[in-house]
Structure formats: C-alpha cells, structure tokens
Amino acid sequence: MIFRVSIVKLLVFTIAFVGCSRDDRAKITSLVKKKPGSTPAVSPVAEERIVQRDISSSGAGFQVKDVMLLRSSVESCVGPDMLKVTTDMLMPDNLSSTPKGADGRIRFLLPIQYASNDDIIDKERGNLLDLEAGSRTSVSADGLTDTYLRSLETIGNVVAHNCAPNNPNCSCAGKEQALAMMTRCLPGINPNTIEMTESAALLGAICAEGVDGMRTAVASLIASYAFALAR
Amino acid sequence: MKYQLNRRSLIKIGAKGAVGAIGLEQLLGIPLIGDYIDHWPSSRLAHLLGVNPYDAFQMMDLAWRGGLGVPFANAQATPAGWTLVQIKVCNHVFTPLVFKLGQLNPDNSVTIDTAAGMKLGSEKMGAAKDLLIGKGLDLISDNARWRNLRFNKWFADILQNGTADGDAAQTSANARGLSSADIAPLSADKVAVQAFLGLGQISMNNHALKGCKLRATQPDVTLFAQSTGLITSPLGITCFMMGEAYDQAEGSISRNAVLGKDGEAVVVNSRSVQAYVSQISQFVGKSYADRQPLEQNVIYKMDQIVQKDPKLRRDLVDSIAQFQAGMTNLDAAASLEKTRQTLQAAQGNAQNQNRRMVGAASEFLGQCKYVVTSLDLPGNPVRNFSLFLNATDLDGRTADSATDGGGGNPTVQALSYVEAMRQLGMGLNVLAKAIANGKKMVVVVHSEGGRDVNMADSKTSFALVLGPKGASLLDDQLYANKAMINQTKNDVIANPAQPTAAVPWDVEGLVEANGAASANTVVPNTGDVQLGVIEFLESQTGIKARAGLTGVDGRFVKLKRVS
C-alpha cells in the first residue's frame, strides 16, 4: 500500500516538475504560468486533468462544510487542540499598529471580538454554515460567500498560529510533504491531478520558507475553496 | 455575479454579522433586518446596535466586526457616484489673504485709496509681512484665470502650484510633507473654481459651528446630501478635526462635527486622520494566509483545484492588494498630522500648542490627502467628507499669530491665519488634482464669518467651490458685486468683513427656490452657496433633494455651468 502511494507520488512529481528543483515561489509560479490553462505537455496523468468538481458559486450542486464538518476536517488535517485562541493572537488595544508578538508571531484578532481560550469555530459560527442553528444566522449551504471565506481565513490563521515548528501535522516543506498534507486534508480530492500537483509545488515552496512560511502554507490551505468544499 | 456596494447593503450585511454574533436577531424576532435599516438611524435597532450609519468611523468598525472585511469594499463595478467635500474654515476668514479687491487698471495693477483710509491686506501680517508682500499679497494674480476671480498673487500661486511658497517647483522646504505625486499645476480645462464674495452669515453667531450649517434649521451640507441620497457614501460621513478643539465663541461645540437639523445636535463626531487610518487598516488586517498577488497566490492556486475561476477569491485578493497599496498613502496622510515645520516667524507658519507658538503641522493637508487616497480604495467606501481648517481666533492680533485669543485654551491647536490660508491653497491643489484625474468630486470651502481689517470677529465672508469642468459641469466664475469690488474706496474695499460689505451681487447666480432670479436687493449667504452645490448634485444625479426647502431656505446660488 505504502509502496503504491509512493509510486503514484513519484510519477506525479516526475511528470509535473521535471527540472524544477528549487523552492522558490517566483520560479514555481512562472513554471505554472508556462502551462496556459490548456493541456499540459506531459501526459498519462495530464489526461486526467480534470477539475474533480466543477463547482460554481452561483449554483447549488455543492455544499460548503458546516461547522461540525469543518471542525472534524481541521482535526483530521492538523490534529486536535488547534482551534484555541491564545492571547498572543490578539491585537493590542491601540489599533494603529499590529506588531508581531514577542515570539515573532503576528497578531490578527481584534480584542473586542475575540478573547483568549475562545474556540475559533464557535466564535465564527455566525459567519459559517451552522445547520444546528438553522440558516437564519449563518450562510446558506449552497453559497460560498465572502463572509464564509473571510471566516475560514480567520480559522486558518488560528490553526497556523498554533502550529509549532516541530508539529508533524504542520510539516509541508517541499513538494512531497505538501502533497501529503493536501492529500490528508483534502481527502475527497484526487491527488493525481495537475491542479493538485501544481498547488503542492507552490505550497511546498512557501512552506519551506521558515516558520512563517509554514504558517502561511497551513493557513492558506485551510482558507482555500478546496478546504471549504471538499469532503 | 456583480457586487453592488452601497450603504444600505453594507449596513444590512454588517448588521447581519453583528446581530448574528450577539444573537440579537433571534432575541428580537426580526426576520428582515434590511427593512429596518432603511429607517436608520431612528430605529430602535440602530440604537440597540449602537451604530450610527452616518458615522464612517463607527461603520468601519461595524463592517469589520460583522465579518465584512475587504471583499465588501470591493468590486463596485458601477460608477462610483459623486463625492462631496465640505471644508469649514473656523474661526472666520480674512478676505485679503485670498482676494485682492480695488480698482483693476488696464495694466492689471489694482488701486485703492489709502489716503482715504483703505488698507492694504498686508498691514496686519506681523512678522510675515515682508514675505507676503514679496510674494504678492497686495497684488492681484498675474495669472489671468485667477485674476478673473480676484485672487491675490500669493494665494493664487499656492493654489496653482500646491507649494507652500507658491513656487512652481516642489522642494523639501515648500512641500510641507506632500510628495510630488500629491500636487500638480491646477488644471485649467478639467477643474472649475468658483469664488463667492460678500456672503452674510446664516445666523448672526460668531465663530460657532452651527454657523457652518446649510440653514439654521437644516443640517450640514454633508448630512443633507447623504440623507437625501445625493451622495451615496457606503460607510457614511468622514468628519475630521484638526487638533482637539477650536475656539468657539457663540456656540457650544468646540470641535468639528456634522450637525443635524436641530441647533447643534451632533450627528457625526470628528476624529483625526490617524484615527480613521487606524480604522481602515483593520479592513486589511494581518493574516498568515497568503495575500500575494494572484499569480503567486497559493490559496488561489488551491481554489482552482475545485473551481476553474474562483471569482470570489480573485476579488478578495485584488481588493486586499488595492487596500494595502492605499494603506501606504493613507499612512502617509496620517503622518502629515505629525509633520511639523520649524517655526519661522518671517513665514508666519505658527500653530498654537499649549498656549505657545510652534511650527505648524500639516494636519489640514493630511485631511486632503486622506480624501484623495480613500477615493482610490476599492469600492469607494467613503465619499462624503467634512474637513476642518482651524484658524486661530485672532481678536485683534496679527495674522502671523497662532496663540488662542479666546482665553488661552491649551487644547486649541489652531494655525495662524497665514499658515491656514497657505494650507488651504495647497490642500485645494491636492483635491483639484483628483478632480482633474476624473474623480467626480465637489469641494465647498466656507466659514462662519469674516475677520475685519483690525482682525476682530466680524460677519461677512467668502466661499470657494471646486468641481469638474466640462459640458454640463462647472465653469470658473466670480460671484460678487463686481462694481463695488472694482473701486478705490467704499465699504467693501475698506473692510470686506463688516456687515455692510455683505451686498447683493450684480452678476447672475442667486436664485429663489423655484429658479427665478432673486431680487437685486437680496444679500447672499454661506448657506446659499452650499445649497447651490446641492442643486448641482441634483442636476447630476437626477435626485430631487430640496423639495422641502421653500422661501428663504430654498434660495440658492445657481453654479455656473460650461455652456
């Protein structure tokens, strides 16, 4: 089983990133840009170039994750106890600046809205799909909205902030680890698509840029459409 | 999917977030919050939420707390509508610092009869007198356009070039903290400038904020325009204060505020530029999640795994980038508040600080820069502005003085009259550049009274209007009793601020509510000019806002259009 997965990964990387040996965002993105949305140069897998779900935000046919599914998805992705708000996430009372905290982590939550020990998904409930509360105070199931995405970003930020450098669930430096994380966090998506491999390459490049890069990668993954929609 | 950003939708969404966050919607059993929003701010819901929809500062906070963030300020695909800027110059204005009245000779010199007691504008300029004379305070502008408006050369050059000394070239010494990108030679074909002389007060109060209202029983022009829909500023009215207080005499409000119909009822309080910038910075916020441009943005890349064209993300990322770019300029605007010059007596560049004179900060310029910068923010979330130019209450002292004449209030951080008019000219240049660049913006400058030749409080003042020039738009014009200002001696020449200097104009412009020309005995006032701005906005938007204004209250100046 492990052998089979490794073979698949090897195949994917060989096809998509021949000659791409640098963890540099600009280079990665330029490589991505060389492939102008049409059929890529290489094939067997390239023929699988499908968007697994052709989802339109204006239609029904899909559902964003509700708060329960979102919670379990985050836990499956990065493990338990990653949703807690801590004091060093809160901006100072003087909002004229938002300096990094003593440990170098950024501050991104308004103290008037969040408090230490809050569960971020509970706090964001009103901006998410909350089937328990009904739709009156939350977004509807078939509408991916700015509010939902913004809220997802906040959740992603909290998770990223809680990601310690030695947390294996947050390890994503390089293409392989990035794809492994994406495969684990987006289990409903075929990992063998061009889109996945391209994303993994960029995510891995960013994640390799130190602790800040790792947190950017984690937050970005959780803030994505893919995380919002994929089961 | 097109996003329409307007105040109502913002409030709705913001209220939804805020209400949802505190469970108020369920508590009150209100299924359709939007229906209540239309009645704000009078509805109980508004009070319960503690949010004033006219107050940009509060609305920004609500928008942020409601989870709106950047994307809601994005994607105003439709034209942005008009922007209104009101500039209140308090305490009173000294006409000779802007205009040169007297008999205009064929060689473009101006003669007044000093032997008969007519005084030159430079007489009460204190230590700045020589500099001002050298820069042309006592001369009419040598620029034909400004000469037609009767501007003196000193003010005209500053207005034309946007520099503190009026020079065409900006230097570190004359920039007052502005950058070369902030100013430009004032466009002759894209920006109209209108001047109004001999204006009476709307009531007889001296340096009282209520004297800046549209009418004694009407609100500020900004509130009138917002509440009638002439100006659709999504986040309400931005109201600035310069320093902490101004030296009000016959009113009770010692700071700038947007006033309502009733006397001095405060509808929107004023804040510093820094306070607004801090609030806007919360829209952008900080984030671990990637905020790189789209082509390098990993979230966008991952979005494409499940959607080929993740438009929401594109709008979000683009708008964040635009906000971040705007934040640089907004931060620069805020820093102008702290950009303080070295005090130079010969420049008259003083500001009052704790009862002593220090070099002036560029606070008013900060307000102007904030206005033009915010008009570049995605969605134009703010389009209605009340600016404040705090000129000290001289009470007989010379125009280079900045110390407070009303008893030495240490919280009054007013400018000397010289510096105030200098920053006014520069600030108008900054705003004019935005108009020349296509912003649909009207600027009205006025005061609550005039300052007489002895620098005492008086009654008669002037006003200025800037706006886009072009077909069906505005044209340059001077509204005055042109015969009287073109003589060597009379009441107007002797003392343009005295009550008898408020005289009927001999040019077309002042009209009654029904559009008929006013009788040639009617004296115009500052409210008539502001109502002229309202009428102009009506003509541009098709909205009839003045329906309830009749009789004297309905009188207005028909601003000259390009024919």
Image (cartoon, coloured by chain):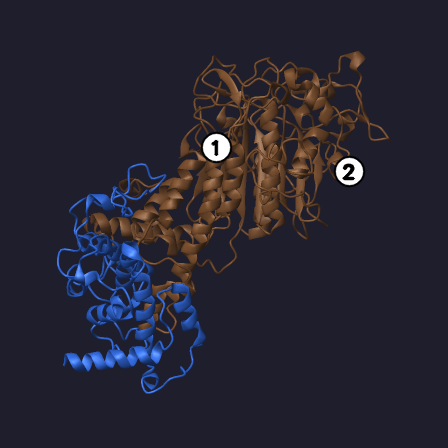
Residue B144, numbered circle: 2
- On the rendered structure, is B249 left or right of B124? left
SS class, disc 2: helix
**Marks 2 and 1, the one that precedes in the sequence:** 2
Numbered disc 1: what chain? B
Task: Please give left or right for residue A57 compared with residue B318 in the image.
Answer: left
Please name the residue that numbered disc 1 is placed on.
B337
Q: The C terminus of chain A appears in which quarter of the rendering?
A: bottom left
Taking depth in this image into account, of B1 and B513 the one nearest to the observer is B1
**Chain B representation colour:** brown
* Location of residue B165 in the rendering, given as x and y in whole percent from the top left corner: 66, 31
Residue A154 visible to the viewer: yes
On screen, B504 above or below A198? above
Which residue is rendered at x = 45% and y = 76% of the image?
A: A36
Specify the amino acid type for callout 1.
Answer: Glu
Marks 2 and 1 share the same chain: yes
- In the image, residue A126 sits, relative to residue A109, either above or below, namely below
Whether pointer 2 and pointer 1 mark residues with C-beta atoms closer than 8 Å, the reply is: no
Front-most of A49 and B6? A49
**Residue A57 appears in the figure:** no
Q: Position of residue B169 (x, y in %)?
A: 67, 38
Q: Residue flagged by tag 2: what amino acid is it?
A: Ala
